[in-house]
Structure formats: structure tokens, C-alpha cells
Image (cartoon, rainbow, N blue to C red):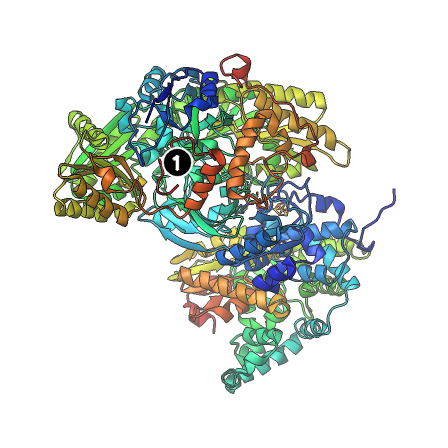
């Protein structure tokens, strides 16, 4: 690679001009880089850094919507919203590392409250994007309910920088709950699934249900009286193993975040399955890790069907073997962090989804010259 | 401005204002039995109204196609109940059917079946002969034999339907007649005249006896006017307006002589058509006023009983009862609560809901005889829904429904008229015995 | 073989309609102002038959339009002349209810309400509840991204669909979405939902089911002014309360409801809010008090709290029947569907009233106030020659919403009705980019053509002028 051009626009106009500048050639879009590793390793001649576009565009607390430039870190945005008792209902582990709003859309990432609020796809109400040919396009708008035209935000959700650059994002925000409490129960995956199901079917409405490293965490948000009542009833359902001190809960949630982020030398994969696959997946992780002598830990939002597995220690080949075992059983797997040498052992993606032909056609329609994030989805396209 | 009726003639075509009430929202679709079966727009209320509308504008002719979709309507009026916009489909249907009868020649086969039905059903004597034949047919094992030989399967669908409908009547009950007058028990509250019904009288004589007993127990003097004939419901619902009107006049004549406070029907179809006499005879100067008075005095037996403070003590009956809404009661007369309340007031009775309660069982007058395929599917569907509720007894207020549902039940669940349950409760006898 | 003969052969004579009178019953959907007679209607009985029918269309270049229950209010299911209508009314099977994974798999012709009915034995339900839920199909809901009263808290169709089996415009079958919402790749499912039948035909849908809330409290609060009711809505939302639903009816709408069903609404109140809270009992009780206080603070004149399930049902039956019930107080009407930011409710209602006065027609309001999604019903009489005036007013109201920073449509879709207004909300590049998505799915443009996007043939050479967003006018955002 010769010289790499870097663009760091701060305005929509500058962003468009950057894309119009043919000298950039193939571009990789970068936020704070918390997910630079996801999927395939793109080839590029230039870097489009979005972190200069980090401004608040408009925020009207009574409307409960906020418009930001896509390079704004989520954590920064949450601080602003917190002043008005509001938040974007999203708690991804990467937020603590500075992940930007645009980057979180492009990765489709989320945290434990996905159990109730889903991912950013469920909060974004409008976007402005700039395509590879410098076309600027908007979809959606500033109101929470809107069906006019196609929803480009959805399309960009999970696009990993291959369709265009998210420039501006409009989000719906939620009120912060007056009270919150977490119940923690040490238990295996099957018990966790069963207990989680009883909390849900018992209409206790946990805002998050996470099974992390052998502990089920159920968080309740609401009014002080309501939360207390539900926590009590949840404790009754859980039996004697339950703890619910605030300190312990804070620590337990911190473990979830650290596990998902991983550290240098780890491999981290994200897996999507149907909820009831949790026990089988947990067993598979244990088995494969033991077989290949790597240390594995996992955290799951079982009812949102989202799991993260972290592999630590052992050789790249061993990591490759475990990932392959997981991917074979559950094709909807994304490798988010690669241990050294793993890329050489393993293609970036496993079995493609059934609609891969449509994915390919969409990519072609938006970026016919494969200019953006080229190779990110290889070998699919 | 020239008034035109498009493809309709000038004699009472469907009225433009009534057609305009339909806003095409489709809320009526799920309650329409023919739509449930086929899913075709022109066999839905919205589609039928649309066809009428187009015909009224002269954009489509009155032909076999149009007639086919109007014929296939069961007249169950579930759409009227479902419609938030207040479309009076009943009036539209009543206006359209005679037009089609006048302008669209029927196929030969269709004509024959209809003629046979109208030649038998409205006449108790002929009905009795047919039913007697039915009893013998069963008794002598002919039924089993014809089934075994596969003869039934080779009958035309319409005849197969009629064969299947034959109820398990007893010869004795075929010839049972009610006394001309039953005195009120205790102080008389009302004098009521009871309509025996033609098919009813023959096939469900037990129900009439039970009705008279319950009314008497509740303080009504019951008279059964001599010489009463068919109320014309079948003709009315089939678009044979003139026949229906003639029958209405005769019935009014007969019942006026009884000088009763209230005219009571226990067959939903009869009750609903008698309540329409005012409309039917509105253009007849000699009868318009009398018809209005008569129509206003008609009550379904459950309706009347619900109006009367109960007097006779109820004895417990332990049974889980599925109440099936007869269309002509629930939709045409909007009587849903009263029979349920009456049943619930019997100690020991547990009332259970039937899924898709609003969907017609496919009986609807003579529908099961003239549109047997759709009727069969609806009957099966209704029977399956009833069986899923696992009742001990099924109660419904229409003879046609009783016949139709019975035909498709896999299990032998007793079917009764609600009044029979009340009768058993008041008399303090088990339900089975009461029906003997 | 001609395409018509081929379709007849593939599907069977009894599953195709060609008779002119019968075809005419398919010429419009819930929006009867637009009518086009299709060349044929087909009623496939399986996904394979849908795919076969679309395959024939693809080979012969015949446009096709999917149709569910035909309750759409934007002409989305309006046929194309010389094209076919594919009715999904024979795909009405509930394939599976899976209480363990909290989902149901259904065919597209299943009605919205029937999903909840099938889930009820497990204590579960399907959350999005369009007023037309008893009749509209899940296929239509997916196409329109339908919402309903309870979408304020629970979100829209797009938030509750996990996967869709789709027949693409070339007749191939694929699956968008899957077992989990967390899948790699573009969210094609999310983009498909709300695409108004222009990207393919749904032949099976997997929806998420929710556990029924433990407690539900519902009230009707009367207000002496429309502005008071609008401000109360803003107040409730600003207080950090997320009710399951906040609906508003004005006096005309209340009169229509009273004429249609057994009504619990006060006949002479100027406006009424229906507020429903659901969730865990203690939380609900606490916030229910708070909502009543907020209403009182904004001049509420009377509060009716539903005593039992029956009374609650009456409140909702009235609300949900309101559109159609308007048929009782006016021979004809237009339903509008604009959205404004929630803080501007009182303002927009005032302006609509003024515009109505000026135009000399009546406007009834019944709408999803919590979302800012207005449904002004413009009442008129065709016979009295008021059609054009009313139509103009209706369009002006939608465009007013755009002007105030809102949207042309909150849930009914653009369809044939508002395609020509799209340029007021979106610029050329915006629309061109959306069309790139369409071309990826349907390069031949056979799938429900003429909807959503303006065409010169439909709108004339110069469609409406673009209206800058208020933020643009204020110089906060710029359009390049
Ligand atoms: C009285 C009334 C009240 C209403 N209330 C609401 C409301 O509260 N909220 C709301 O959102 N809407 C409402 N609507 C509008 C309408 O009911 C919804 O848009 C509904 O989703 C349409 O469903 P349908 O089955 O009738 O679809 P149709 O009207 O038949 O079709 C609608 C669109 O979907 C497409 N389509 C249908 N089936 C499929 C399929 N299987 N695959 C792909 N495309 C398909 C059609 O091509 C068309 O573009 C209301 C309508 C009425 C008449
Ligand atoms: S009367 Fe019954 S069968 Fe006829 S259109 Fe109405 S609902 Fe359908
Ligand atoms: S009859 Fe009533 S319910 Fe049916 S489409 Fe017309 S207005 Fe709607």
C-alpha cells in the first residue's frame, strides 16, 4: 500500500466533497475504530474518518427526538440526553470505548436492553447518507412515526461501511426510568432460560435478561414502587441463589461489557439464534473450547437471540476450530475481534444467508464500483 | 333529471343512499361465511354491495354471474352486525333478490331444486310425509344401506345435503300437536300467541311443547292460533317477495283473531321475518298499518322471557352448554344477550364460548339445500369449533342450525333449543327426560 | 402460450378470475377514489403457487399487485391495467405458535387479530394493532409497516417481525431476516417492511409475540378545548410516561362513534383523550394517577376510568370503529394521515380548524395523539359538489404536516394517493437513492408499479415543489 489519503470532514458538504474526490480511490469508513475488525478486512486507498462530524444538530426534549452528526460518540449523546432525563434506549459494550452513533448503526450492535428495545434499527427515525458517488440522500424524518418512502436507515443497519457514509442520524429517545434494580442468579444456561421465561410469562417485564458467565442478570426499570414489587416477585421465582445488591449488580453488568469488548489477543464472535438454542449453544461452546484447549466465556441476551462468545488463550488455529464449530451450527455469526493470525486460518464469513443474492444486488446498486469497504463481506461479495 | 336505476327495474331497486353508506372498509369481511370459505371479493358483503352498486349505475348487467354471487349469500346478516358504517345490507339484499328473480332465468337444475324445496318446506303436511319417509328410511336401515352401497355419494350434492339433514325424529313427535290454549300458572301476566312454525312443528314438536310450558310457568296464557300457515320466511329470504307477502297477510289475519298481547316465535328465522312484515307490506294500503302493529308485537321467546321477571323457580342442571348464535336471532334480531342470560340463570349451567362464534353454520334458510358445497364446509367448520369447546350440550334457537350442525358433529353431543333447558330446569327433570 | 393461459394452467381455472364484473370488485381498495380494473385476479393457495404466478409474470413482463384484505387507505393495492392482482386470501394458515421462542409463523392472509387470538391461550399477543386489525392481513401490515393505537409504547410492524419468506420479482423465493434479529448483513427485512408491496410478495411471516401485560388501566378524559387536550398529550410525554396508547377524538368524531356503536364518550365534549397504561400493576397504578393529574392541570373537565374489561372494550370499539363510523354523519370523506412533532399538536389542530372554516367543509379528528400521527377526516358530499374542495383541503393538511417538520404519512402509506406529494418531502436525490433499492429487488419494475414514487405519467411533468424542513429553513441542516 502506497500513501493512504485520510479525510476528516466536519460538515456534510465536506463529507460529500471527500467522496467526490476521486483521488481517494477505495475508502474505508472509520469512526473511533471500536469495530474496525468486524468481518472481513477491507482493502483501501483512503480512510474516511467520521469523528470530525460529532455535533448535535437539534434536540427538542418535548418531541423526544434528537438529530446528531453520525460521528458523535453515543456516550456523549447519552450525557446530553441525561440532563433532560432521557436516553437512547441502547447500551452496547462498545459505547464505553467511544463507539459513534453511525458506527453502531453500521454494525447493528446493541447491549442487554436489546431484550426490550432492540437495536438502533428500532430507534433510528431518519438518516442522511452519502453514497460512493457523492450522492446525498435522506430518508425518514424527525417524527417517530413515518412510512413515507423506503427506510434507508434499515438498509444501512449492519452495512459495515459498504453502502455509503452515514452523515446524520435522527433518533427517538426514551424517558429514563425513575428506578432500576437487578436480580442476579448463579445458574446454568438451561436454568437461566427457564427462569428468564418465567419472568417474561409472569409479566414482570424485565428490561434486560442477560446470562453472562454463569449468572443470570434480570434488570427491572420503572417507578420506585413498581421496581421494588417486581424485584421481590422475581426473587421469589428465583429461589435462594438470588442476589440483588446494587454493588454486585453493577459489577455483574461490568463483566458483560468487558466480555463483549474483549482484549488484545482475544477472539470475539457474535451469534444470532432462536431463543431456545441457548442451552445447546452454551454446551457447544464448552465442548469446542475444551476440545481445542482455549478459554471460552459467553454472554447472551437469550430472548433477543443474541450471544457473544469470547475466546482467550491458545493458538490461532485452535480459535479457528472453535469458530468453525460455532459457525457450522449457527451460520449467523460475525467475528468481531480476531486473535493474531486467525485471519489466515479462517474465511471472514461462514455460510451466507439465503438472501445473499439480494445483498449482492443492493451492494451493486449503491456502490457499483465496490469503492466502500471493499472486501468487508468477502467471500459473500 | 331522469331517474334511472341502471340495470335494475323500477320496482323497489336497491336504494342509492343505502349503497352509498358502504365506505369499502372491509370490516365485514371476516364475519362473512362465504368469504371465509372462498376468499373471493365478489363473495363478500363488500363485493356484493359493490356489484349491486355497479348494477345500479348500469355498469354491469343483471346476469347469471351477478345472480350467482347474490345467491351464494346466506343472508346471515353477520355483515350488518359487523359494519361500523351502518350499512343496511339486509335491505339491499331484499331489494336485489326479487330483481334477479325477475330478470335472470335460472338453470334448469337450480329451478328444480328450488321448486322442490318450496313445494315441501312451507307445508307441514308435506313436510310430515317427507319426514316420515325419512324416519322409515332410517328405521328400515335403508340409510345405512344406501351409504354402504355408495349411493349417497352418487346423489347430486343438493340431494345429498337434504339426506344428511334428516333429523333423528320420533314418529310420535311428528304427529304431536299443541293444545289450542295453555293456561297461565298463577296470575296471568300476558296473553301470548305462539307461532308453531312449519318445519319446526313437524321436526321439533318437542320444542313447541317446551315453549308453551315455560311461558305458562312464567305466567303467560298461551294460545296457538288454529290454521296458522308458514310465515313466509323462506320465500322472503330467497327473494320470492310476492309469495312472502301473501303468506304474511294470511298469517296476520290468523293471528289478529287471537287477540294476544304478544306474538311469540321460537324459530329465529320465523321471528325475524315476522318482524319485517311492516316493511314487506308497506305498499299495501289494506295491510300496511296492521302489518306494522303485528311486527311490533313479535318477540322471540328468549327475548320475551328476558323481559319478564322470572317467577318459576329454576332447578339445577349440571351441564357445560355451548350456546350457538343463530344468525337470524343474533344478527337479524340482535338478540345475543338474552338467551345467554336465561341459560346462565339456571343453577349448575356453565356457558362456554365457541370460537368464530360470528360465523354462520351454513344452514341459513334453504342455503344448505341450494348451495351445498359452501354450506358443507361451513357446517364442518362450525362443528369443529363446537367440538373444540367440549360442551355437554349445544343450545341454539333455530331449527335449521340444529339440523345443519348435527350433520357434521363427529361426537354425539345433544343439541337442544335453549327453551328445552329452561323447561327441564323449571320442571326439575333431567334434560334427557324432558326431551322425551 | 399467452400469459393468461399459462397462469390459468399453472393455478387452475377455479383460482383465476377473468369475468369483467367479478374483476371490477377488485378495482379498488379502502381508498375508493382510485379505480383500475386488472386484467386478471389470481388466488394462489400456496407460496409455491405465488412463486409460479410471479414467474409467469416475470417471463412475460406482466405487472402484478399483491392484495391482502384491500383495506389499505392509500391505494397501495390499486391494480395496474393489463396487469394482474395476486390475492393472498387463500393463504390463511397459522403455521405455528411457538410460546417458548415467543413467536408465531403465519401465512400472509392471516388477519392481524387472528394472530393474537391464536397466541391468547399461551398468555401472549401480537402487539401492533391497527384499527382495522380484525380484517387487515399481516401481509398488508408488513407491506405498509402498519401501526396502531398501542404502537406508541410497542413500536410498529417493523419492530415485531423477525422474518419473512418473500417471492421476488423474478419468481424466486427467499427469506429475509431469520431466527434472531441479530444477523450479519444489511437489514433487508427492515427495508422491505413498509415498502408497500413494491419489493416482492410476502408468503410467510414470523412475528414476535409479547406476554400480556399484568395490568391495564384505561381512561377517557374530556377537554373543553382541543388545544387543552393537545397540551395534555405533550405534558404526559414530557413527564417521562410512556402510555400504551394516547388517542384523541374531537366532537365530530365522538358524534360519529355514538351514531355507530354503544358509545361511552361524552356527546357534547369538545375533545376527548383515551389514555391507556399497561404493564406491571404497581408501575401502572402510580403513573395512572400522574396522568390524571396532568390532564386536570390542562383543563380536563371529566375523567371516565374503565371499570372493567367490558367498559374498556367499549372505549376501544368506539375508537377503532371511528373511521368507518364517520360514514354515518357524512356521505363521503377523505382520511388524512400526516404526522407532526408531538410538541406541535395543539398548533396544527388549530391551523387545520382554520383551514376547514375557510374551505367551508367539516373536519373530524380522531388520531394517535401520542405519536403526533393525525387522521383528519375531511367530510364532504359528492352530490353537493364538494369533492374538489375537500380533496384540496386534505392534500393541504398533509403538506402542512411536512411544513411543520413532520411527514406525509404515519401509517397508511404513500401508495397511489400521495406519490405526487413525495417531492414535497424528499429531494430528487433522495428519491433516486430509494429507487436504487427498488432496482436491486425488482430491476424490471413489475412489482406494484406506479406506487410510492412520482412518475411523470402520474403527476405531470412537474410534481409539487419541495418544501424545506423547518431545520433547513432555520439553517440548522443544509440540503446540498
Ligand atoms: C377503517 C380502517 C382503519 C384503519 N386503521 C389503520 C390503523 O390504525 N393503522 C394502520 O397502520 N393502518 C390502518 N388502516 C389501513 C390498512 O388497514 C392497513 O394499511 C393494512 O395494513 C392493510 O392491510 P390489507 O391486508 O388490507 O392490505 P391491502 O390493502 O390489500 O394492501 C396494502 C398494500 O400491501 C400490499 N400487500 C398486501 N399483501 C401483501 C403481501 N402478502 N406481500 C406484499 N405486499 C402485500 C399491497 O400490494 C398494497 O400495496 C385502516 C384501514 C381502514 C379501512
Ligand atoms: S348476509 Fe352473511 S353471507 Fe351474506 S354477505 Fe352478509 S355475512 Fe356474507
Ligand atoms: S358493508 Fe360496512 S363493513 Fe362492509 S365494507 Fe361496507 S362499510 Fe365496511
Task: Give the vertical position of A228 relative to A17 (above or below).
Answer: below
Residue C207 drawn at (x, y percent): 41, 45
Residue at numbered disc 1: C216
| Quadrant of the image occupied by residue A58 | top left
Kindly identify the residue that appears in the image at 43 percent across and 41 percent down.
A359
Q: Does residue B335 appear anywhere in the picture?
A: no
- Choose between B38 and B129: the one closer to the eye: B38
> Splitting the image into four quadrants, where does ligand 1 fall?
top right
Q: Residue at x 43, y 64 (%)?
A: B393
Q: Is residue B282 left or right of residue B370?
A: right
Q: Chain of mark 1?
A: C
Q: Position of residue B408 (x, y in %)?
A: 49, 69
- A354 left or right of B119? left
For residue C85, above or below residue C190:
below
Residue in the foreground of this view, choosing between A165 and C131: A165
Query: Which image quarter holds the C terminus of chain A?
Result: top left
The 10 Å Cα crowd at callout 1, few under 14, some 14 to 19, many 20 or more, is: many
Amino acid at each position: 500500500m502506497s500513501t493512504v489519503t485520510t479525510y476528516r470532514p466536519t460538515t456534510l458538504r465536506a463529507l460529500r466533497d471527500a467522496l467526490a474526490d476521486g483521488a481517494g480511490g477505495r475508502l474505508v469508513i472509520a469512526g473511533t475504530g471500536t469495530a474496525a475488525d468486524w468481518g472481513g478486512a477491507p482493502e483501501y486507498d483512503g480512510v474516511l474518518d467520521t469523528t470530525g462530524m460529532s455535533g448535535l444538530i437539534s434536540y427538542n426534549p418535548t418531541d423526544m427526538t434528537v438529530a446528531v452528526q453520525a460521528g458523535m460518540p453515543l456516550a456523549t449523546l447519552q450525557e446530553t440526553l441525561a440532563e433532560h432525563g432521557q436516553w437512547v434506549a441502547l447500551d452496547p459494550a462498545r459505547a464505553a470505548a467511544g463507539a459513534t452513533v453511525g458506527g453502531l448503526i453500521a454494525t447493528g450492535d446493541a447491549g442487554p436492553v436489546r431484550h426490550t428495545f432492540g437495536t438502533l434499527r428500532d430507534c433510528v427515525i431518519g438518516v442522511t447518507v452519502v453514497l460512493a458517488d457523492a450522492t446525498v440522500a435522506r430518508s425518514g424524518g424527525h417524527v417517530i412515526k413515518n412510512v413515507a418512502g423506503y427506510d434507508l436507515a434499515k438498509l444501512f443497519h449492519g452495512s459495515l461501511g459498504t453502502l455509503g457514509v452515514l452523515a446524520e442520524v435522527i433518533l427517538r429517545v426514551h424517558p429514563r426510568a425513575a428506578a432500576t434494580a437487578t436480580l442476579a442468579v448463579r445458574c446454568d444456561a438451561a436454568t437461566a432460560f427457564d427462569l428468564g421465561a418465567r419472568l417474561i410469562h409472569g409479566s414482570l417485564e424485565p428490561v434486560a435478561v442477560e446470562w453472562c458467565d454463569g449468572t443470570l442478570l434480570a434488570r427491572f426499570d420503572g417507578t420506585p414502587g413498581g421496581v421494588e414489587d417486581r424485584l421481590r416477585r422475581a426473587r421469589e421465582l428465583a429461589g435462594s441463589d438470588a442476589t440483588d445488591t446494587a454493588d454486585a449488580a453493577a459489577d455483574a453488568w461490568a463483566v458483560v461489557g468487558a466480555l463483549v469488548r474483549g482484549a488484545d489477543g482475544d477472539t470475539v464472535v457474535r451469534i444470532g439464534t432462536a431463543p431456545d438454542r441457548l442451552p445447546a449453544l452454551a454446551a457447544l461452546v464448552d465442548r469446542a473450547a475444551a476440545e481445542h484447549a482455549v478459554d471460552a466465556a459467553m454472554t447472551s441476551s437469550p430472548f433477543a437471540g443474541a450471544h457473544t462468545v469470547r475466546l482467550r488463550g491458545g493458538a490461532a488455529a485452535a480459535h479457528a476450530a472453535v469458530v468453525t464449530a460455532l459457525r457450522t451450527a449457527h451460520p449467523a455469526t460475525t467475528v468481531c475481534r480476531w486473535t493474531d493470525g486467525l485471519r489466515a486460518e479462517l474465511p471472514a464469513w461462514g455460510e451466507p444467508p439465503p438472501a445473499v443474492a439480494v445483498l449482492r444486488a443492493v451492494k451493486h446498486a449503491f456502490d457499483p464500483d465496490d469503492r466502500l469497504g471493499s472486501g468487508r463481506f468477502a467471500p459473500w461479495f | 333529471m331522469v331517474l334511472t336505476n341502471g340495470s335494475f327495474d323500477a320496482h323497489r331497486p336497491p336504494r342509492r343512499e343505502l349503497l352509498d353508506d358502504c365506505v369499502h372498509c372491509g370490516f365485514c369481511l371476516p364475519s362473512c361465511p362465504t368469504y371465509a370459505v372462498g376468499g373471493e371479493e365478489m363473495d363478500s358483503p363488500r363485493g356484493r354491495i359493490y356489484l349491486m352498486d355497479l348494477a345500479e349505475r348500469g355498469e354491469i348487467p343483471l346476469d347469471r354471474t351477478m345472480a350467482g354471487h347474490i345467491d351464494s349469500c346466506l343472508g346471515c346478516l353477520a355483515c350488518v352486525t359487523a359494519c361500523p358504517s351502518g350499512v343496511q345490507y339486509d335491505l339491499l339484499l331484499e331489494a336485489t333478490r326479487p330483481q334477479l328473480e325477475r330478470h335472470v332465468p335460472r338453470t334448469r337444475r337450480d329451478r328444480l331444486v328450488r321448486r322442490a324445496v318450496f313445494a315441501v318446506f312451507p307445508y307441514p303436511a308435506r313436510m310430515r310425509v317427507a319426514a316420515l319417509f325419512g324416519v322409515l328410511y332410517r328405521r328400515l336401515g335403508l340409510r345405512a344401506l344406501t351409504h354402504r352401497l355408495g349411493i349417497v355419494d352418487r346423489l347430486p350434492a343438493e340431494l345429498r345435503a337434504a339426506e344428511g339433514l334428516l333429523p333423528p325424529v320420533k314418529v310420535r313427535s311428528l304427529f304431536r300437536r299443541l293444545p289450542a290454549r295453555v293456561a297461565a300458572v298463577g296470575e296471568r301476566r300476558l296473553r301470548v300467541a305462539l307461532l308453531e312454525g312449519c318445519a319446526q312443528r313437524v321436526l321439533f314438536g318437542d320444542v313447541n311443547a317446551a315453549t308453551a310450558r315455560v311461558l305458562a310457568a312464567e305466567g303467560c296464557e298461551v294460545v296457538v292460533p288454529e290454521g296458522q300457515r308458514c310465515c313466509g320466511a323462506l320465500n322472503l329470504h330467497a327473494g320470492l317477495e310476492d309469495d312472502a307477502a301473501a303468506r304474511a297477510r294470511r298469517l296476520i289475519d290468523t293471528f289478529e283473531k287471537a287477540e294476544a298481547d304478544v306474538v311469540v316465535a321460537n324459530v329465529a328465522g320465523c321471528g325475524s321475518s315476522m318482524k319485517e312484515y311492516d316493511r314487506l307490506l308497506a305498499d299495501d294500503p289494506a295491510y300496511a298499518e296492521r302489518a306494522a302493529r303485528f311486527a311490533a308485537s313479535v318477540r322471540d321467546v328468549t327475548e320475551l322471557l328476558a323481559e319478564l321477571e322470572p317467577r318459576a323457580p329454576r332447578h339445577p342442571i349440571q351441564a357445560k352448554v355451548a350456546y350457538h348464535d343463530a344468525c337470524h336471532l343474533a344478527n337479524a334480531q340482535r338478540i345475543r344477550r338474552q338467551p345467554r342470560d336465561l341459560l346462565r340463570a339456571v343453577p349448575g349451567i356453565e356457558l362456554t364460548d365457541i370460537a368464530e362464534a360470528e360465523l354462520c353454520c351454513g344452514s341459513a334458510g334453504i342455503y344448505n339445500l341450494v348451495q351445498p358445497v359452501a354450506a358443507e364446509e361451513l357446517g364442518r367448520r362450525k362443528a369443529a369449533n363446537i367440538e373444540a369447546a367440549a360442551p355437554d350440550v349445544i343450545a341454539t334457537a333455530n331449527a335449521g342450525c340444529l339440523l345443519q350442525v348435527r350433520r357434521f358433529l363427529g361426537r354425539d353431543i345433544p343439541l337442544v333449543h335453549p327453551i328445552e333447558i329452561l323447561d327441564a330446569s323449571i320442571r326439575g327433570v333431567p334434560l334427557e327426560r324432558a326431551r322425551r | 402460450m399467452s400469459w393468461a393461459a399459462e397462469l390459468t394452467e399453472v393455478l387452475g381455472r377455479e383460482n383465476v378470475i377473468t369475468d369483467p364484473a367479478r374483476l371490477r370488485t377488485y378495482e379498488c381498495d379502502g381508498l375508493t377514489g382510485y379505480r383500475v380494473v386488472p386484467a386478471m385476479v389470481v388466488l394462489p393457495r400456496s407460496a409455491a403457487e405465488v412463486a409460479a404466478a410471479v414467474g409467469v409474470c416475470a417471463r412475460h413482463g406482466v405487472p402484478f399487485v399483491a392484495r391482502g384484505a384491500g383495506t389499505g387507505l392509500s391505494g397501495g393495492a390499486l391494480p395496474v391495467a393489463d396487469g394482474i392482482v395476486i390475492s393472498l386470501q387463500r393463504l390463511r394458515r397459522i403455521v405455528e405458535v411457538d410460546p417458548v421462542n415467543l413467536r408465531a409463523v403465519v401465512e400472509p392472509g392471516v388477519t392481524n387479530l387472528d394472530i393474537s387470538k391464536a397466541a391468547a391461550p399461551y398468555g401472549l399477543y401480537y402487539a401492533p394493532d391497527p384499527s382495522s386489525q380484525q380484517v387487515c392481513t399481516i401481509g398488508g401490515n408488513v407491506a405498509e409497516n402498519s401501526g396502531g393505537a398501542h404502537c406508541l409504547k410497542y413500536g410498529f410492524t417493523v419492530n415485531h417481525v423477525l422474518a419473512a419468506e418473500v417471492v421476488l420479482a423474478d419468481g424466486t423465493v427467499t427469506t429475509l431476516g431469520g431466527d434472531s434479529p441479530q444477523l450479519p448483513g444489511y437489514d433487508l427485512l427492515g427495508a422491505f417492511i413498509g415498502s408497500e408491496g413494491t419489493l416482492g410478495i410476502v408468503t410467510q411471516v414470523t412475528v414476535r409475540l409479547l406476554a400480556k401485560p399484568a395490568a391495564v388501566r384505561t381512561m377517557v378524559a374530556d377537554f373543553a378545548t382541543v388545544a387543552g387536550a393537545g397540551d395534555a398529550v405533550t405534558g404526559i410525554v414530557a413527564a417521562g410516561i410512556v402510555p400504551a396508547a394516547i388517542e384523541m377524538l374531537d366532537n365530530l368524531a365522538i358524534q360519529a362513534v355514538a351514531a355507530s356503536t354503544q358509545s361511552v364518550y361524552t356527546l357534547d365534549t369538545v375533545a376527548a383523550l383515551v389514555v391507556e397504561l399497561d404493564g406491571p400493576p404497581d408501575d401502572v397504578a402510580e403513573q395512572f394517577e400522574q396522568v390524571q393529574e396532568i390532564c386536570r392541570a390542562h383543563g380536563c373537565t371529566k375523567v371516565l376510568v374503565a371499570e372493567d374489561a367490558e367498559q374498556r372494550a367499549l372505549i376501544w370499539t368506539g375508537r377503532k370503529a371511528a373511521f368507518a363510523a364517520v360514514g354515518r354523519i357524512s356521505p363521503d370523506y377523505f382520511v388524512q394521515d400526516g404526522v407532526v412533532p408531538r410538541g406541535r399538536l395543539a398548533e396544527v389542530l388549530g391551523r387545520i380548524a382554520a383551514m376547514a372554516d375557510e374551505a367551508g367543509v367539516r373536519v373530524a379528528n380522531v388520531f394517535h395523539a401520542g405519536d403526533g400521527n393525525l387522521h383528519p377526516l375531511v367530510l364532504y358530499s359528492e352530490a353537493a359538489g364538494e369533492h374538489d374542495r375537500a380533496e384540496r383541503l386534505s392534500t393541504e393538511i398533509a403538506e402542512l404536516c411536512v411544513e411543520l417538520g413532520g411527514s406525509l404519512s404515519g401509517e397508511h402509506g404513500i401508495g397511489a394517493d400521495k406519490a405526487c406529494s413525495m417531492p414535497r418531502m424528499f429531494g430528487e436525490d433522495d428519491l433516486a437513492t430509494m429507487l436504487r433499492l427498488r432496482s436491486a429487488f425488482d430491476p424490471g419494475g413489475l412489482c406494484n408499479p406506479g406506487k410510492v414514487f412520482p412518475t411523470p405519467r402520474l403527476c405531470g411533468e412537474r410534481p409539487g415543489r419541495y418544501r424545506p424542513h423547518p431545520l433547513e429553513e432555520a439553517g440548522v441542516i443544509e440540503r446540498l
